[in-house]
Image (tube, helix red, strand yellow):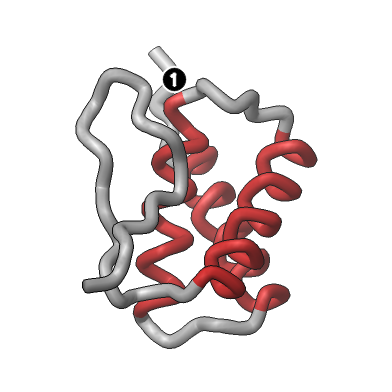
Amino acid sequence: MKESITLSPDQGRGVMPFRNIVDAEQLATLTTILDDYCEQAGIEGSHPARERLAIRLIALFTGGIDNPDDIRMALDGIAKDARSNIVHL
């Protein structure tokens, strides 16, 4: 049986195991993409947006987007959509 791999440590919440989805090398690449993206966006490690980005990153990867540049572009598009959907009161 393969070891369960998580993208982020358990912070008092349930951990989402990624069984048979990514190998160690892929996980390292995805983690680097997430770390770099969050650093550039000013998102700190414990911010809820980081977890949402991680979930989206995994969805992009498992959906067939496996090129790091393509993943970054997709994350940029998601961030732009989120900013444009802000409702001003």
Q: Residue 8 at x, y = what percent?
A: 45, 41
Q: Is residue 86 left or right of residue 4?
A: right
Please say if 59 is above or below 75: below
For the point 72% across and 75% down, the residue is 69
Q: Residue 26 at x, y = what percent?
A: 56, 73
Please say if 5 is above or below 84: below
For the point 26% across and 48% down, the residue is 16
Q: Residue 17 at x, y = what percent?
A: 26, 54
Mark 1: secondary structure: loop
Disc tally is 1
What is the quadrant of residue 31 in the picture?
bottom right
For the point 21% across and 33% down, the residue is 14
Please say if 32 is above or below 73: above
Could you say which is closer to the camera, residue 89 or residue 30?
30
What residue is pinned by disc 1?
Answer: 88
| Tag 1: amino acid | His
Q: 10 Å neighbourhood of mark 1: few (<14), some, or many (≥20)?
A: few
Give the residue furthest to the right. Answer: 40
What is the quadrant of residue 89 in the picture?
top left
Give the residue furthest to the front. Answer: 1
Give the residue furthest to the bottom. Answer: 64
Q: Is residue 28 left or right of residue 78?
A: right
Could you say which is closer to the camera, residue 60 or residue 21?
21
Q: Residue 12 at x, y = what percent?
A: 28, 19
Q: On the rendered image, what quadrant is the N terminus found in?
A: bottom left
What is the quadrant of residue 25 in the picture?
bottom right
For the point 44% across and 20% down, the residue is 88
Please say if 42 is above or below 16: above
